[in-house]
Image (spheres, rainbow, N blue to C red):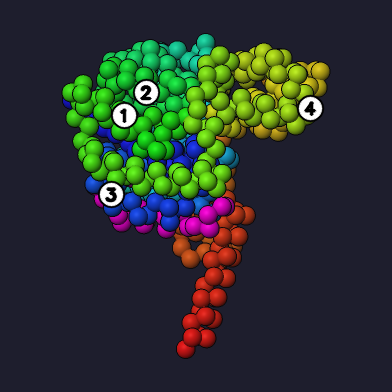
């Protein structure tokens, strides 16, 4: 039996443990070794890495991708794409989504893991279609959440619909680490019975369930699991690559991984980890087990946001009320999965409802846009009273919101004449306008300084 491993140290582990602040200089020297380990794929791009490169690390994300591609040729390179939002939080016109996917693949991505926060498949269909057109591997990801309407049948329907869209594999994306071993077993079993595609399982160790959840998922027939090299595993990151490899090999699985190489990779990242602990970039607390998410059925990240919001407003004594209000708001909003940006919207609304003394007295513009249908279709029914209160006579959007958006690329390209050096730069700008412009300015300045320096030397 074959079991594939996806290594997440460069993307999700990096994002979950050190807020995606790992610069390329901290991992470039281990890429040749990673290439020898036998991983099925390396998740190395997308998610928050793109934003972080431009905003904090003064790195060109496209350049990072090309550099990884040059050194890692034996494993597939994988990225995480937020469907119609590409890597940001607003909706982009189809044209931008297609160009972003195309250029990601041209620069080295082999597997596109594509998801939508609401599991509204209309928000991933264009990205999937473009991935297929470019001849790359399209992986449809289902956001895993718990609610009365998120039943096995509901997940099976999503997976079937993704299969008809032509995806090559399906990922169960448990972003909060709340999927239990039994739930994973039941879900993978149901998907395996109903779709004829490889199933990938992605979870986090946050609540301590991670390794058990992966074990049961593989027992039920999962074909690929996401893990992180042990020095960057555990806590809010993924379960450890070496431990899972050890366990599954003993159970007779062919993982394709080389233990001696994994050890070298881990020794390397141990040093990186020590450095991050010393500088304070890595807070050891994120490596601990946090079971509150299982009690409140709220992801850990969302819980800590609720705490800090209440602390800021000097209202920590209202926590119990907010924790009771949150599931109510979520129900009235049609049970969105508690993933960014929905977790923030639901959390802020619950806090407002409690602190203002009147439910829905203050409603954020994001929640209004959500109710209008700009984010896509809610998984469940939106409470009619809430809808009427906020929207009045206005009709919600029923079609694909992206289709109403004007194209943006040519305009941005014209605006960046003399600044953008290629179409990738234009895409960086479209994803994060201000920080991309700042990055371009810094880049130009550095070049001028370098030229001046060499002239002086002559
Ligand atoms: Co994740």
The quarter of the rendered structure image containing the N terminus is: top left
Give the image location of residue 355, x and y in percent.
Answer: 78, 22
Q: In this view, does 45 lie to the left or right of 400?
A: left
Give the image location of residue 6, x and y in percent.
Answer: 32, 36
- Lower sequence index among marks 2 and 4: 2
The Cα atoms of the two marked residues, 4 and 3, are separated by: 50 Å
Dot 3 surroundings within 10 Å: few (below 14), some, or many (20 or more)?
some
- Tag nearer the camera, 2 or 1: 1
Q: Give the residue pinned by disc 4.
A: 314
Asked whether residue 161 appears in the rendered view, the answer is no
Dot 3 and dot 1 residues touching (CB under 8 Å) = no
Q: Give the residue pinned by disc 3.
A: 33
Dot 2 and dot 4 residues touching (CB under 8 Å) = no
Dot 2 and dot 3 residues touching (CB under 8 Å) = no
Asked whether residue 6 appears in the rendered view, the answer is yes
Q: Give the residue pinned by disc 2.
A: 211
Q: Give the residue pinned by disc 1.
A: 243
Secondary structure, mark 3, is helix
Give the image location of residue 235, x and y in percent.
Answer: 47, 29
Q: What stretch is highlighted in magenta?
A: 55-78
């Amino acid at each position: 039996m074959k079991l594939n491993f996806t290594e997440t140290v460069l993307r999700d582990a990096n994002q979950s443990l050190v807020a995606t602040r790992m610069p390329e200089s901290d991992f470039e020297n281990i890429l040749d070794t990673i290439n020898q380990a036998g991983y099925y794929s390396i998740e190395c791009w997308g998610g928050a890495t793109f934003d972080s490169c431009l905003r904090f690390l003064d790195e060109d994300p496209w350049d990072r991708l090309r550099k990884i591609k040059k050194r890692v040729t034996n494993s597939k390179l994988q990225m995480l794409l937020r469907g119609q939002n590409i890597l940001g939080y607003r909706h982009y016109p189809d044209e931008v989504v297609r160009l972003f996917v195309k250029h990601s693949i041209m620069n080295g991505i082999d597997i596109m893991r594509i998801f939508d926060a609401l599991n509204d498949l209309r928000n991933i269909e264009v990205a999937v279609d473009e991935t297929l057109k470019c001849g790359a591997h399209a992986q449809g990801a289902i956001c895993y959440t718990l609610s009365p309407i998120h039943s096995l049948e509901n997940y099976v329907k999503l997976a079937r619909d993704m299969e008809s869209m032509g995806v090559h594999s399906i990922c169960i994306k448990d972003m909060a680490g709340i999927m239990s071993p039994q739930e994973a077993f039941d879900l993978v079993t149901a998907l395996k019975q109903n779709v004829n595609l490889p199933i990938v399982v992605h979870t986090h160790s946050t609540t301590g369930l991670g390794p058990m959840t992966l074990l049961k998922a593989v027992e039920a027939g999962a074909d690929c699991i996401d893990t992180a090299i042990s020095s960057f595993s555990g806590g809010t990151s993924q379960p450890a690559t070496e431990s899972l490899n050890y366990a599954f090999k003993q159970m007779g699985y062919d993982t394709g991984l080389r233990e001696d190489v994994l050890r070298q990779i881990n020794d390397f990242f141990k040093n990186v980890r020590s450095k991050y602990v010393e500088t304070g970039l890595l807070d050891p607390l994120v490596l601990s087990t946090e079971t509150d998410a299982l009690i409140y059925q709220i992801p850990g990240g969302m819980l800590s946001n609720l705490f800090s919001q209440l602390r800021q407003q000097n209202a920590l004594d209202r926590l119990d009320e907010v924790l009771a209000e949150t599931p109510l708001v979520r129900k009235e909003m049609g049970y969105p999965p508690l993933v960014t940006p929905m977790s923030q919207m639901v959390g802020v609304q619950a806090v407002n409802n409690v602190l203002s003394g009147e439910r829905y007295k203050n409603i954020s513009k994001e929640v209004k846009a959500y109710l209008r249908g700009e984010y896509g279709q809610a998984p469940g029914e939106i409470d009619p009273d809430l809808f009427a209160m906020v929207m009045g006579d206005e009709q919600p959007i029923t079609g694909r919101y992206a289709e109403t958006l004007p194209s943006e690329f040519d305009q941005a390209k014209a605006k960046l004449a003399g600044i953008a050096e290629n179409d990738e730069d234009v895409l960086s700008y479209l994803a994060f306008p201000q920080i991309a412009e700042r990055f371009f300015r810094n880049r130009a300045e550095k070049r001028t300084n370098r030229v001046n320096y060499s002239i002086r030397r002559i």
